[in-house]
Amino acid sequence: MDFELYMQKTDMCKEGRATFYEVHKKLSEPWFENIMDEAYAAYDEGDEKFEEFLTKISGKLDVSVEFLTLYFYVRISERTYLTYKKLGICDDIFYSSMDDFEISSRLGFDRIGIYGVPRSPDRPWQRLILENKIYRLGRLQFELYESPVDAEIDGHNVKVGDTVINVHIPAFAPLREEDCEAAYALARDFFKKYHGIDACIFYCDSWLLHPWLSEELPESSGIVCFQKKYKLLKTEESPKSTLLYVFAKEYDNISDYPEDTKLRRLVKARLIKGLPLGSGHGIRL
């Protein structure tokens, strides 16, 4: 794989690229001759074995487990790339999908101060990407999914277990209505072409769908526009997902939460008042 092209396409940060090549050079030395065979074997056995492998290599290289996770995910994605090619999926979609490693690494730095893919909750999520189950199509990510609910929308009935398209919203980009609608259009074409789905029903479980947001944000807000496209099925009152996505981490004291954006100020005010934060589940066509 052309790693420089990979890093350009996935927008890996300058420091990440430098460390990647440092690790790559060390692992090219004779005593690491079979390192990728070990990495694939450990990865295929599951996250527990993969953690043991990464911890062992981390001690030898004096490189964080989080960064080694990023490094080996890039290397393992070479195998994913072959699957994309076999299916005829274009390179742009491959690189867009693999960009999630950089997003997780940036979030990891915000959460724990270490650049690289955190152990939890990111590893199970990244497996879905490496195993060809989640695709980045424009602004959004899409996953073939079994519906967890019975629902109806505009004459379309969905039963538990039916195939729906689970929608995920990557961080670090504006949530513009036109970008999201373009992404849904790409998804309709993609899943029809590669998975034979003629009519996509999109399902989303996200803090972005909780009703309080549309009550407090202006009509022009990208979040409000995103919400309005969905038929809300249910809500869950749990602040953790909101806090992780809005602030990157949970703080011990409410007073420590930053107030540098309007959204952060609104969320912090609700925490202080004891008002609900949580997620919403919805569907749309």
Image (tube, helix red, strand yellow):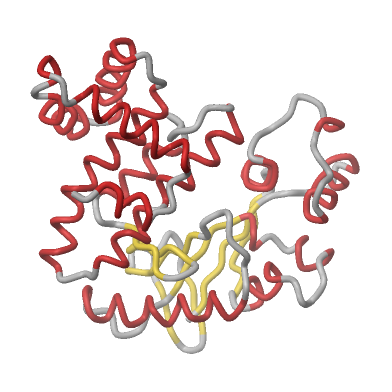
Q: Residue furthest top?
A: 59
Decide: is 71 above or below 167.
above
Q: Residue at x 21, y 24 (%)?
A: 27
The residue sitting at 39% across, 39% down in the picture is 17
Q: Nearer the viewer, residue 273 or 96?
A: 96
Does residue 201 lie above or below 255 as drawn? below
Whether residue 139 sits left or right of residue 83 in the image: it is right
User: Residue 96, percent across and down?
Assistant: 37, 61
The percent position of residue 61, horizontal first and vertical second, equals: 31, 15
38 to 258, vertically: above or below? above
Q: Where, by quadrant of the figure, is residue 174 drawn?
A: bottom right
Front-lying residue, 110 or 167: 110
Residue that lies at the very extreme toward the bottom in this rendered image: 155
On screen, 15 above or below 81? above
Say which residue appears at 38% left-offset and 19% top-offset.
63
Q: Which of these two is toward me, 182 or 206? A: 182
Q: How many marks?
A: 0
Horizontal arrangement in the rendering, residue 22 relative to residue 184 (left or right)? left
Q: Horizontal and vertical percent for residue 97?
A: 35, 58
Q: Residue at x 68, y 71 (%)?
A: 222
Q: Is residue 223 visible?
A: yes
Q: Position of residue 21 (x, y in %)?
A: 31, 33
Q: Is residue 146 visible?
A: no
